[in-house]
């Protein structure tokens, strides 16, 4: 057995043991059944529909003789071919680029072709992302890859989920998800990173230290000096020793994963509604991406520095197009009974129902 195959086998065993005996702090779809049940019950009440449980994770909503069924987060939108296409990231990059939409520069390779990945990294020394080329979610994804050793480690992890691997340069900006239903954008959320405000006297490092003292006193996680911190400051022309101007608001980190796993299998936590901030050009791009895929209900994932400006102006990209986008990303369950766009979603489903 080759050394590479042995390393992959050992990594798979560690992952299996961690899933079986480790403490899973992540919350996946199968652990959100109760949340989605409460959410759909509230949606049904608001829409004047009858809610009926068919199975613990399968429900029926009916009104005026029309009914639709929901399985946890999955709804009766789109067909299996659309679902399969969306999960093939290199295919979607190619199709979107062919229609003039901005996508990341990328490389498709296999685990046995690490020298190609190392060559791609050499052209993008600020860091790269390596992920499974097929499938959804954050599993198998490593960000801020900067060395040949890290390329190998990230490729091994991604290979557990897909034979084909995808490599992209790190893109400056924050992550957004735009919901497109029946050809129109209906909602948008942002993974907002932490921000601080300059006072014209203290350096970035001093401002971060003061913020961390506040966070520790409040029992919150401190901000860490890691690659995301350095990368995020750099694309704003800042560094730890820079002195931001009085009143200058700057982004400290682009990632807000509460588990802070150093760029490995980071979970996207959308925490800010930005529907009214999306400029017409970005909205049109998201709607065009949904048309290219041919999907009825699509989550278009973007990375951009400024959602109020066209992607081409700020180096933004469409990095993924997801079918069956999960509605729990689009509301704060501590303050709302259901997401803002949920009633529109239900009306569309009932209108399509026989």
Image (spheres, grey):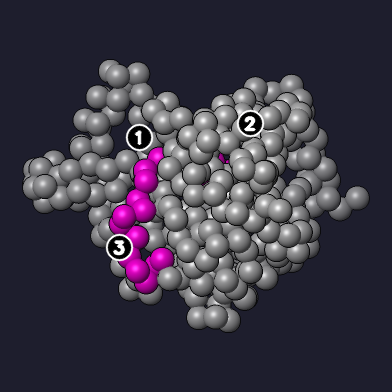
Q: Position of residue 321 (x, y in %)?
A: 58, 61
The residue mark sitting in front, 3 or 1, is 3
Query: Which SS class for mark 3?
Result: loop
Q: Is residue 111 visible?
A: no
Q: Is residue 280 magenta?
A: yes
Q: Is residue 71 visible?
A: yes
Query: Which SS class for mark 2?
Result: strand
Q: Which residue is mark 1?
A: 223
Q: Residue at x 52, y 66 (%)?
A: 183
Q: Residue at x 37, y 43 (%)?
A: 272
Pick whichever, 71 or 199, lies toward us.
71
What is the span of residues highlighted in magenta in the rendered image? 262-283
Q: Which residue is mark 3?
A: 308
Q: Say few, some or many: other residues with alpha carbon within 10 Å of mark 3 (under 14 / 14 to 19 / 20 or more).
A: some
Viewed as shown, does residue 161 lie left or right of 327?
right
On screen, residue 280 above or below 47 = below
For marks 2 and 1 on the same chain, the one whose residue lies earlier in the sequence: 2
For marks 3 and 1 on the same chain, the one whose residue lies earlier in the sequence: 1
Q: Which residue is mark 2?
A: 51
Q: Is residue 225 magenta?
A: no
Q: Position of residue 207 (x, y in %)?
A: 20, 37
Q: Residue at x 63, y 69 (%)?
A: 294
Q: Say few, some or many: other residues with alpha carbon within 10 Å of mark 2 (under 14 / 14 to 19 / 20 or more).
A: many
Is label 2 in contact with label 3 (beta carbons under 8 Å)? no
Marks 2 and 3, how far apart at CA = 39 Å
Marks 2 and 1, how far apart at CA = 44 Å
């Amino acid at each position: 057995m080759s050394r590479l195959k042995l390393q992959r086998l050992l990594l798979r065993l560690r992952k299996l043991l961690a899933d079986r005996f480790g403490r899973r702090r992540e919350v996946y779809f199968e652990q959100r059944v109760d949340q989605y049940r409460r959410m759909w019950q509230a949606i049904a009440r608001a829409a004047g529909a009858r809610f009926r449980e068919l199975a613990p994770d399968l429900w029926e909503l009916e009104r005026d003789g029309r009914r639709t069924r929901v399985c946890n987060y999955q709804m009766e939108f789109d067909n299996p071919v659309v679902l399969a296409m969306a999960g093939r990231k290199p295919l979607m990059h190619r199709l979107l680029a062919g229609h003039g939409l901005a996508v990341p520069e990328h490389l498709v390779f296999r685990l046995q072709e690490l020298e190609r990945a190392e060559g791609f990294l050499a052209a993008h020394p600020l860091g790269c992302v390596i992920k499974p080329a097929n499938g959804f979610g954050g599993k198998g994804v490593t960000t801020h890859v900067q060395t040949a050793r890290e390329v190998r480690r990230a490729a091994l992890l991604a290979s557990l989920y897909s034979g084909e691997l995808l490599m992209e340069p790190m893109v400056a900006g924050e992550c957004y998800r735009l919901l497109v239903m029946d050809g129109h954008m209906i909602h948008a959320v942002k993974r907002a990173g932490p921000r601080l405000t300059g006072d014209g006297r203290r350096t970035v490092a001093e401002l971060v230290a003061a913020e961390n003292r506040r966070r520790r006193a409040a029992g919150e996680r401190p901000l860490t000096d890691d690659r995301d911190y350095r990368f995020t400051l750099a694309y704003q022309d800042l560094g730890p020793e820079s002195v931001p101007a009085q009143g200058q608001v700057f982004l400290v980190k682009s990632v807000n994963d509460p588990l802070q796993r150093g760029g490995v299998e980071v979970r996207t936590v959308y925490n800010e509604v930005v529907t009214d901030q999306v400029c017409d050009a970005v909205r049109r791009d998201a709607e065009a991406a949904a048309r290219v895929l041919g999907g009825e209900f699509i989550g278009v994932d973007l990375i951009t520095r400024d959602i109020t400006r066209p992607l081409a102006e700020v180096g933004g990209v469409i990095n993924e197009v997801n079918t069956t986008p999960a509605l729990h990303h689009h509301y704060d369950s501590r303050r709302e009974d259901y997401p803002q766009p949920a009633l529109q979603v239900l009306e569309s489903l009932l209108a399509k129902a026989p």
